[in-house]
Amino acid sequence: MPSRTTRPGILSLLFFLLAGTSLSIRANGQVGDIAVLINPKNPATNISLVDLRKMFSGEKRTWPGGLPVRLIVRQSGCHERLTMLRLLGMSEREYKQFWTAQVFRGEADSEPVAVPSFGIVKESVEALPGGISFVEAQSIKPGMYVKVIKVDGHLPGEPGYPLK
């Protein structure tokens, strides 16, 4: 009969192996494209990478037609958040400082809402007419009440799609 001292060791080893497998999948680039998700009633079908950057930096605050942009971002450490930070050319710390300065100067009411899950992103974008967010493209399933728009004329998965 195995002793009690071997069980925690086996569990620790199993956890270590599973964590390592998860990290290696991400490190090998097997995480897919990041889609731009908007409210389904928004008539937009394409956005330039430049305008996307302007929206997520607070420089562009309305959609064509005047609808206010409502930014929904994922929490720190998520693939979508890292993609947003790369788009903006900022670190997490610089991003926080940037939005703090925007609010302090009265150029923004608050930092964009940061949510913990795809489900909350989806619900938020559905509820806010000007809602926009980044999501892992593989999370979007047929029949969902959401809209993915092209970035520089490309959808996720197509050659030339810029958001990874």
Image (cartoon, helix red, strand yellow):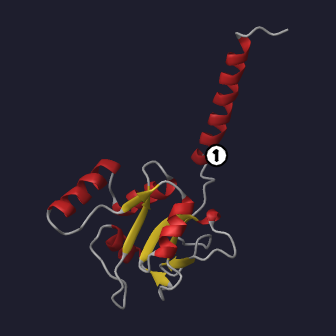
- In the picture as drawn, the residue positioned furthest to the bottom comes out as 65
68 on left or right of 31:
left
Q: Is residue 158 above or below residue 45?
A: above
Q: Residues within 10 Å of mark 1 (few under 14, many from 20)?
A: few
Q: Position of residue 150 (x, y in %)?
A: 52, 79
Check disc 1 and give the amino acid type.
Answer: Ile
Work out whether residue 164 or residue 118 is closer to the camera in this orientation and state it: 118
Which residue appears at 32% of the width and 73% of the height? 54
Which residue appears at 41% of the width and 58% of the height? 114
Q: Quadrant of the N terminus?
A: top right
- In the picture as drawn, the residue positioned furthest to the left comes out as 105
143 on left or right of 121:
right
Whether residue 27 is visible to the viewer of this picture, yes or no, is: yes
Q: Which of the 4 image quadrants contains residue 68?
A: bottom left
Which residue appears at 73% of the width and 16% of the height? 7
Q: Position of residue 118 (x, y in %)?
A: 55, 60
Whether residue 162 is visible to the viewer of this picture, yes or no, is: no
Q: Is residue 108 above or below residue 8?
A: below
Q: Is residue 2 above or below residue 39?
A: above
Work out whether residue 142 or residue 95 is closer to the camera in this orientation and state it: 142
Which residue appears at 44% of the width and 80% of the height? 129
- In the picture as drawn, the residue positioned furthest to the right comes out as 1
Residue located beneath label 1 in the image? 25
